[in-house]
Amino acid sequence: MLKSFISWAFLLCSSLSLLAIETSCTFDPEPKTYLKIEPTQPKQHLIVHSYTLKNISSEIISDLFLSVNMDREEQKQIGMQQLEKEENFWRWWQKYQLKIAENEAYSSSLGCSINLPFRKVPASKRDLQEFYFNNHWHLIDQKHQLGYLALDNHTLVGYEEVADDPFLVLRTKASDLESKFDFSRSSMNFAHLDIFPKEFDGFEPNDVKPGMQWTNKSSTLYPRETLTFYDNGLVEQTVILAERALPSSILYLTSAYPIVQLINHTSEEIILENQKKIIASQSTYDFEVPVWTVEIRAHDPTGTLTLVGQNCEKHLWTLGSNVVDIGAKKDVGATLLTVHYDLELKKSPDVCIVNPSAHFDHTSPYFELSSLSNLTEKIWWQISTDINFDYLIPNFQRIEDFKNRVTIDKLTDTFFNSQTNYYFRVKTLQDSYWSEWSTPFKFTVDKPKPVAHPVFKKIGEKEYEISWEPSEFSDTQYHIFASNALDFTPSLYTQKQYNWMDHDQQLFDEVDNWLISAPHCSIKIGSDYAFYRIIAEREGQYSTPSPLIRVYDYELAIPRTVLQIPRDSLQEEARRIEFPPPYVHLLVPFHPPISKSANAPSLYPNYYVQPSHIEPSIWLQLQPFFLPENHPIKPKLDRLFSKRVTQNKESLQKAGFMQPTPMRFSKTIVTRNKNIPGFIFKFFGDDQIEINDSERCYARVAGAISIQEALNRHHINHLFVVPTKWIYPLPEAPYPLKQNNLQRKNFIVIENEIDIFSGKENNKMWKSPIINCHTLSWIYILLQELGLNDSPYNFNMPIAKDNRIAFVDTEHHHKWPVPLKKLWQFLSPPMRDFWNQLCEEKNL
């Protein structure tokens, strides 16, 4: 029977001012004890530094899971309900502190594992994961407690978003609480991400409904062993090898908390079997990925080990009565619980927030502080959209020396949104003790709306234009920044561009990438730069920057760079590395400004390489129509098709394709991909045999080019539109499975999506005044001139939302006769008569 012997002792240590209370009690029907901690004077509050559970019996106590003042079943239900309602996954993650251990997501504060899909993120010299929630991946750096927000400052983004827009990482503070924003730290943080992975698992998980299960993880205490919980979130378990010695020299140690470290206190070396590591006497081993179980081989199993685990359970000790649940299932043994704590007087902060205004419309937020004491050493301030401060952006808190005004730097200012309530609070440090938090100060910010959807288009030979929607305020200025570095940050925030760095040194250039400021909503650009951003300004307030704008064209062979830690690097050393240009014959020599190494490596070639199984004549025929290597979606496609997603319908669905079933007559798969909006994909699966995909892809792209040429020649682009179409060659590897019912496909067609009416709405539009004698006459000319024999159907020529007629099916062209009378059924009665008359005049 699990017994306990009550022995109370208050111990006062003058040097540390640390109190301790010890108790053990009888576990009658349930393994619980009640511990009362009394204040010694009014207005005190409790600070628990650690608490230790020791097995003081000769029995083995198993299935231990210690919790204080918490019903685990109730907390699990609350946590699950909050997860189902939560839109901001990072908010939930911060509260329950998810961990990853041995391919399992786990919350020790809830005492359960979480059925939440996650995957490994491509990274160099760092272990990163992202979680799948609400049909979206969320990248969270657990070690550094970092998540990355989209430019809406609300949505937590995944790996692919930060790979395509490094600014999301670069603007996020990666330094400690007592440091100001350090751009070198955030640059190094980004450099760890492998943005050009050789292989990427882009498949969507099958089971996407989150759930919780009781964890089967628990701790076991042998006689004299202890389990100690610290206020820094770590748990230490002492393991006495002599108590656990077995005839076999293999010892299996398990923990209820993910094990991150093992300390060998014995006089001999031990071997970690799974990790294949030898741990010398009196040394420490840090696990790269937390584990639940360690397998140890010891020649002479004597002495002690310490297992250090992660515990994100909040200390819920309170003054007065406390309920401690050990969670042991078997009613044997006896334990001693010791709690080390301090009693401090509740102390108000030594400063007052004396801002004259709570609304900032001409400047970044600032906070005036009035000191109530000359002894204030430091302040700790926080900003949150949550009045309870359960949710914090890394940039929105800092510990610094006392000052009368707290200001916000321009990069941190990008996290503020207009028409949003924010709360500022502060606490003070005096005589090594922190005060309570101040009453939250509510404030709002008024800033220009960001340029959300800039449009890039070609207007001439090596001439391009970027345009955007104008602000509602005519006095808004637009600042345009440009660079050939994918990871560039507008020089409004910093002029440092790092070219080489490790833990101790950095080499950088001072770069001013401001290009021009203009009051209008478009800018003509040439072929000097590959990347642009736009920042709006009004009355001294700057907007959040626009998304990264990528310029692309076949002629734009601009050398581009990015800071990366090469995957084959032996050192944690980041270097600015060149992107490969689009085609070998356009290769421009490029030498990064790096003095550290004369032989700076380039990334492996990322331009199109002819696979060995494709005939040279076919490759040469299609090459002029390949998607430009610098197109914005090219990196997404490279990641997506690093797996053989065209193998079958199931693999297409996992890859995010929304309609993977072939069309009834053409057998073509016509689909969108939910992760690449704004584009339509047309291709064939490997399980569709006896189909010449190169021939049919060529026909679609050539047809679109022929139609566009005719629209330009007749000057009727105001009446008709045809989507731009490209061919994307699938990589040679990975290969499809070797099966008789599979035929390898090599190409897909990608076209920009036109916003069109469909179904009944399209039928109605075809009977509207848009279809008149003038438009029908031009339809007749185009169908006949180009031999568009599959186009006289309203579903192949739908009406676009801008009232133009769209040619969306361009595969069949220069084929006569054209069945013009097929169009008659879709017209209004007057237009039917006109169409008949038109066809009769031409003897059709």
Image (cartoon, rainbow, N blue to C red):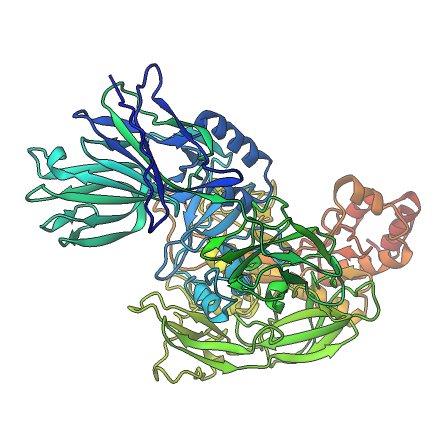
Indicate left or right for 247 with 380 as reference. left
The answer to whether 475 is drawn above or below residue 229 in the figure is below
Q: Residue at x 50, y 53 (%)?
A: 434
Residues 643 and 184: in front is 184
Indicate left or right for 565 with 764 as reference. left
Residues 490 and 527: in front is 490
- Among the 4 quarters of the image, the one containing residue 525: bottom right
The answer to whether 363 is drawn above or below residue 670 in the figure is below
Residue 168, percent across and down? 55, 61
Residue 3, percent across and down? 26, 20
Q: Residue at x 29, y 43 (%)?
A: 291
Residues 245 and 512: in front is 245
Q: Residue at x 74, y 44 (%)?
A: 758
Would you say residue 469 is visible in this rendering?
yes
Figure quadrant of the N terminus:
top left
Q: Residue at x 30, y 69 (%)?
A: 571
Numbered-mark total: 0
Q: Residue furthest right?
A: 830
Would you say residue 728 is visible in this rendering?
no
- Among the 4 quarters of the image, the one containing residue 35: top left
Residue 321, percent across and down? 45, 27
Residue 501, percent across and down? 40, 74
- Among the 4 quarters of the image, the one containing residue 21: top left
